[in-house]
Image (tube, coloured by chain):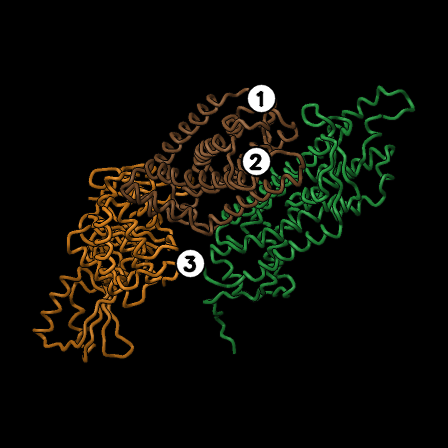
Amino acid sequence: MEQAIFGQAIREYLRPKRVLPWLLLGGVCALLAYFWRSLQPGSQPVDQYANVSSMLVFRIVALASAIFTTAIISQEVEQRTIVYLLTRPVPRWKLLLIRYSASVLVVGILGIVGALLTSWGAYRGFAPNPLLGKDLQALMMGAFAYGALFLFVSLLFNRAMLVCLLFAFGWETSVPNMPGSMNSLSILTYMQAIAEHPSAQDQSKLMGIAAGALGNNAISADKAWGVLVGLTVVMLALSAWWFTHFEYVPREDAE
Amino acid sequence: MASPIADLTYRNYDGPLEPPLYRWWAIAKASMQLSLKKKGLWWLAAGGAFWYLFMLAMLYVMDMLSQNVPLGQKNPFLQQIIWKDQFLNAFSVAQLSLFIIALLIGVGAIANDNRANALLVYLSKPVSRLDYLIGKWLGIFIPITVIVAVPTFVFFAYCAMSYRDYGFLTEDPRLPFKLLLMVLVPGVFHASVSLGISALFNQGRLAGATYAGLYFMTLFFTKAMQVVHWASSEDGGKAPAIVKTLFYCSIDGIQIALAKIILGTDGTALFPQAGGSRGGPPIPSIPAPSPTLFFGIFFGICFLSLLIAWTRIRAVEVIG
Amino acid sequence: MINLENVSRWYGQVIGLNDVSCQIGPGLTALLGMNGAGKSTLMRLISGQLRSTTGSLTIFGMEPFGNPEVYRRLGYCPEIDNFYEHYSGREFVKFLGRLDGLSKSQSAIRTEEVLQMVGMADRADKKIAGYSKGMRQRIKLAQAMIHDPEIILLDEPLNGLDPIGRREFIDILAHLAEQGKTILVSSHILFEVEQMTRSILLLHRGRLMASGDLRVIRSLIDKHPHQVRIETEEPRRAAVLLAGLPNVVSMRFDRGGNALQLEVREPDEFYDKLADIVLQDGLKVTGFTSPDNNLESVFKYLVGS
């Protein structure tokens, strides 16, 4: 049963129509990293990778999470197929968490593909990239954390995607650069802490603004892991409770 | 001879019929009525006017401070303001709000009709595809344009009444006409692109996701170009010329570029002497790009979007 | 099996279902009502998609909302016409079978059985997006039956089916009812319901207006005497003979002149006496109908009163 739910969700998320735009985005990241040298002569491949990764690849995870995670329940409600899922002998929390896992897997893979392509672009081929390992971890953890947060949001709001996009691009663009402890309210800050990009500490401050890494960067990678795992667990627990206790019935009107 | 008992079994409309000219207006009106019911629209409209409100507060405070300036001298802060640049700044700041408004009222316009098979109903009436397209386009264009225009011209009126001594009217006598042109840009752009994307989907959510993806990813691309430009300036080097053009290659960027071209300015900050974020060096502004190229891109994108919408508007029942 | 006690459901300030109490047992029961009467609300309450605002609703003694134990024994065929369009009918049914707890092989076997039952076995490999309305209805019924549930809820199942499809559908439901399953079918098309069952639940404006056997309900409606139409070559003589019966409330001749329209009370007693008259007085009766002894009349009398 669990396998069927997971398989169906993965099949839904991996439809070519859905995945292709993300692969194209990954391609754009790779091209940008590839040509960064021409745009900023003298920069090293590791910097080129770090710049494009911080500015675009990390955002891909946020954007993909907003879109895929809201599909877990909101899309089913919108296309009214939720009825088939909720009238089966599957506990609601289980249904939710399995579909969440599928979406995180897909978002994580899209982020990882983006990072690999960017690395390929920056190094003009597959070469050892000292930042890649931690980046992949950060991206995967980001997929879990964004996914859990957006899942909860999608259970609360009708227009969840709008709220999630505002969070992903409004909040997550401005808050990480805020002074004091404000930046600790952003998921991106913790992803940056896990990734430990040199741009966050050593490079141009202007680069830091764009990368969302200008705030207090004293957060250790261990603390970042702890916070993101904690956030994920709390949000998933809240989502599971909420989804189990409240009604999800398709709307009659199509607006 | 007519029967003394009226046959009321079929209640048909026998009042005056609107001439065909107004059919698109009925669609536009229905779209706008639906939009105006959304509370979020009003909040976002207020958000779009944020910079003007900030400016009004700032100018008021500075005015108060000018009471300490010796008689016969002018307030140095107000004197250094380049007025048309403030309209450009407000226009730039409002971009995110305007985009979200487009998401809220625009991208679902055709997709939701596809979903509800309303398109089938519309086109079964004596409404042509053109009526439908124009109606839907106006239904997005008018609210967005009004939301941009109202604070712009309120601010203009306030400044015209209060800061003539600081060159508000003499700095650029054609400013009102330029503003009139500038406020049309977001409405035209968002209405066209929203409809083009909307027509490709039968779920407003997916259309919204697509537009949002396009908006944010191009935005971050242009941010990257901005960073390259800054970094080059910091190093005393020079970025390739194309960076200055690529900087405008986003949904926001195209509109800001056109605003710069229309207003005839490259833009300055409200406090041009202030540094960048966290006390860094002053942020260099990126000059306006080639008018021919960007008007071409602007109208090209609008035309292409409307063409997509036009070809996709068909009375086909969407199952599921 | 399904037990409702004073169940009400509010949507904000609008009441969807108002203080409904009833029991639904094995066999085929029709849930009737006009649009907006509360049929879908009741279906959604029973299928555990909604919670009642007040009152208690139990299935096999358990509350259905989000209860997997109930769903193991309940199949639901919703009114909506939405599917995973890119799935084939076979994949769709098989997938839902897996969600019902069937193993991969069990699900595959049952899928074939139910597709055969609904007449879709040879057409189920096409993508659902290309299905006609009737094919969609059949697939919906198939997915509701795949785990062989004891209770099957069908919300407007006959919508979109052609006459042959309807007949087949009704036969399938009758067959399932004969097997002892509890089947609740909602509809507002009365003549179709009449072909399926005489056991009804009649909802009107959220209230349960009547429940039970159609004939019993009809006989209890005293306000409207039963109409009886007797076709005879001697309508005036028949009138003389029948006028003396205490059950006869009114009578009139048909325009054609060879039939008599009567309004009678206690129809069973009247029919006994009519038989006596036919035998004793040699009244030639060529035809005999009771035009309002049907669901539509019952519905009209109850709802219109």
Q: Secondary structure at mark 3?
A: loop
Q: Nearer the viewer, residue C51 or A134?
A: A134
Q: Which of marks 2 and 1 precedes in the sequence?
A: 2
Relative height, residue C167 to residue B174 (above, below)? below
Q: What residue is drawn where x is 74% and y is 28%?
A: B282
Q: Which chain is green?
A: B
- Residue assigned mark 3: B319
| Mark 3 crowd level (few <14, some 14–19, many ≥20, 10 Å Cα) | some
Q: Quadrant of residue C235?
A: bottom left
Q: Amino acid at mark 2?
A: Tyr
Residue lying at 45% horizontally and 25% vertically, measured from the top left: A225
Asked if labels 2 and 3 share a chain, the reply is no
Residue A244 shows in the view: yes
Instruction: List x then y, in percent, for residue A18.
Output: 47, 49
Tell me the number on the disc at residue A49: 2
Question: Does dot 1 land on a helix, a strand or a loop?
Answer: loop
The chain painted brown is: A
Q: Residue at x 54, y 60 (%)?
A: B312
Label 2 crowding class (10 Å Cα cut-off): few <14, some 14-19, many 20+? many
Determine which of the numbered discs, if any, sits on residue B74 in the image. none
Colour orange maps to chain:
C
Looking at the image, residue C188 sits to the left or right of residue B18; the answer is left
Q: Residue at x 53, y 38 (%)?
A: A119
Read off the residue under disc 1: A216
